[in-house]
Amino acid sequence: MSAEAAIGTGVTLGALGVLCLLLGWAQSMREQHGAAWVLLGIGAVLLVVGGLTAVFAQSGNQSDAATRRAASDSPTAQGPNDRTV
């Protein structure tokens, strides 16, 4: 999974977490505390997991990008415009 996809997944999970938190708050305002606690718990977990996924997704792939960049800078690497005759 690319870094962009992991960040997008984290943001989506975080947004779903916020939605569940808001739904839980709305249920608590309607005096339905059983459903409110379930939605608040799910929302908090999704928000934390989504935030951690979005924050740490890029740091894990930076070493891979540095390795690819170092390999492409080597004199034996051939780019798209290098042709052997």
Image (cartoon, rainbow, N blue to C red):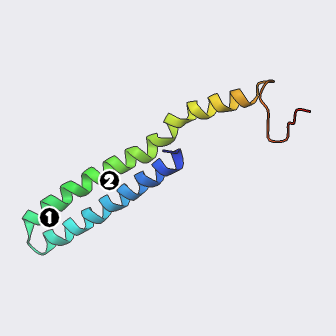
In this rendering, position of residue 61 left or right of residue 27 = right
Side of 34 relative to 65 (left or right): left
| Residue drawn at 57 percent across, 30 percent down | 63
Label 1 close to label 2 by CB (< 8 Å)? no
Check the image and report above or below for 58 versus 8: above
Looking at the image, which residue is at 46% across and 48% down? 6
Toward the viewer: 67 or 62? Answer: 67
Q: Secondary structure at mark 2?
A: helix
**Residue 82, how many percent across, how many down?**
85, 36
Q: Secondary structure at mark 1?
A: helix
50 lies above or below 17: above
- In the rendered image, which quarter contains the C terminus? top right
The residue nearer to you, when weighing 2 against 42, is: 2
Which residue shows up at 29% across the image and 53% down it?
A: 46
Q: Which residue is mark 2?
A: 47
**Residue on which disc 1 sits:** 36
Please tell me which residue is depicted at 25% across the width and 62% down the height of the picture.
21
Q: Which kind of residue does numbered mark 1 sit on?
A: Ala
